[in-house]
Image (cartoon, helix red, strand yellow):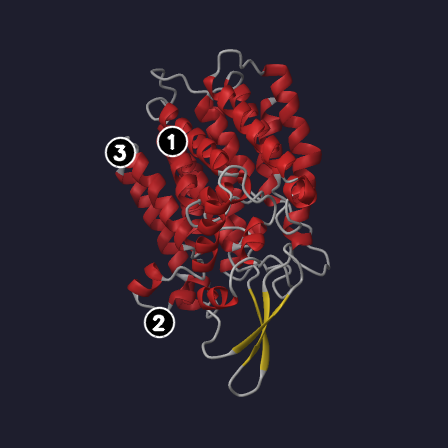
Amino acid sequence: MKPKMFLAILMALPLIVDPGLFLNTESIYLRPKIWWIYLILLPSSLTLIFINGNFTNSRSFKFILVLFTVFLLAGIWHWKDAGNTWMGAPNRGDGIIMHWVYLAVSLSGIAMASRIPDQRTFSFLAVGAAILSLTAILQQIDVAGVPGIDLPGASATVAGGTLGNRGYMGGALALLLPLNIWLVRYRPSVWSYAGLIIVTWGLSATVTRGAWIAGLAGLCVLWLTRQLTLKVILMLSAGIALALAPAFFLPDAPMRSFSGSSPAAILTNNSGRTVLYRSALIGIAERPLLGWGGNALWKVMAKRSDQELLAEGGAPAHVHAERRDFGVNAPPSFILTLPTGEKQWFVLPVNKVHNEYLDYALTYGIPAAVLFTLLLGYGIWNAWTTAPVLSACLVAYGVYLLTWPEVIRFAPIAWFLLGLALAQRRGVTVET
């Protein structure tokens, strides 16, 4: 397995869609990526590890092995719900086996670091980020359509590009933005400048606060490590300006979704996450060691009172609610009777905590959450002085995961960058 071929396989993942006619958008945006990961990316990762891997004295490998074992124990413990725990909920696909794939991809990053210079890897990934950004930009300026936007399932949104949801696209671009800044600094050219502008434009066009804050966190790391220059700031400003421009000319541009909202409202609105966070905290307290297994959030909600779920979920006040029981692996559903006598459905459809650290603890237990956080933190620390651009990428990803879930549509790229960061030798600078 040649390193460049592996990088091409990795960066192809977020671009893959099946724009055919389907009953829901998961068949368009999610399932093709699942097949790509299991049939193409995983064998490629294992081949790279087998040929180039040498983890004998690697502290990172011990971290990964322990996390692998914790996942295994959680899977055995939740054998009664093996399907959702091992393979993940059908609309997520991120069960224990997928997390083992993430670990394998991180090991391939460690193996890759010994075969190909970081500079070439960063350049390749930066180009991939620019290509991915174009799919969001073309949607924002109304050149490309949005397959499946009117179908049920995982929401497909303008500026979500090939990731379907603009929140996912924003997370991917926040993760990769530091690499394009690195390219401008160390490989300056018209193309590198254009790439940085395009990625900044694509990130801005997603209109996702969590992704914006994550991107800003990555920029803060680059500022602290003296990687930001006036030229970089000008390129970033140009990308933001281009993202704002369509709002003045296109009536349906994503930027208009914030029009009429005060800055305080924009920053304090948690977009319905209250019921997710409170349910997660209750569930973690009840089962702290090995969690609840697949669809953990719905399992906890099934045990909570109707009044609490309705109040936290934003149901209309002063209504009669009748709960319909479809099992613990289905979303909590109610039939509401309004004061007018009209009846309507009220459903809490989200089955994953929009905070990955809480989700790890809820699904697999606190030890898994702590190990994941330590592994991410160790990667950030290990690359801080040798390859600060990797630390910036991982900080951006870590901040993104505070308000969004880890999604397989681009998570393997983050785990690969984590592997590169874990492979850095402190005291040996690679960025010049």
- Report x, y in % for residue 129: 50, 40
Q: Residues within 10 Å of mark 2 (few under 14, many from 20)?
A: few
For disc 2, the marked residue is 260
- Report x, y in % for residue 369: 47, 37
| Left or right of 142 in this view: 96 | right
Q: Residue at x 50, y 20 (%)?
A: 62
Above or below, 231 against 245 in this view is above
> Which residue is at the front of the view, 89 or 71?
71
Q: Residues within 10 Å of mark 3 (few under 14, many from 20)?
A: few
**Which quadrant of the structure image shows residue 151?**
bottom right
Q: Residue at x 47, y 75 (%)?
A: 316
| Tag 3 near tag 1, CB within 8 Å | no
> Which residue is at the front of the view, 58 or 394?
58
Disc number for residue 224: 3
Q: Decide if residue 142 is in sight here.
A: yes
| Left or right of 215 in this view: 148 | right
| Left or right of 419 in this view: 145 | right
Disc 1 residue type (three-letter): Ser
Disc 2 residue type (three-letter): Gly
- Report x, y in % for residue 319: 50, 79
For disc 1, the marked residue is 391
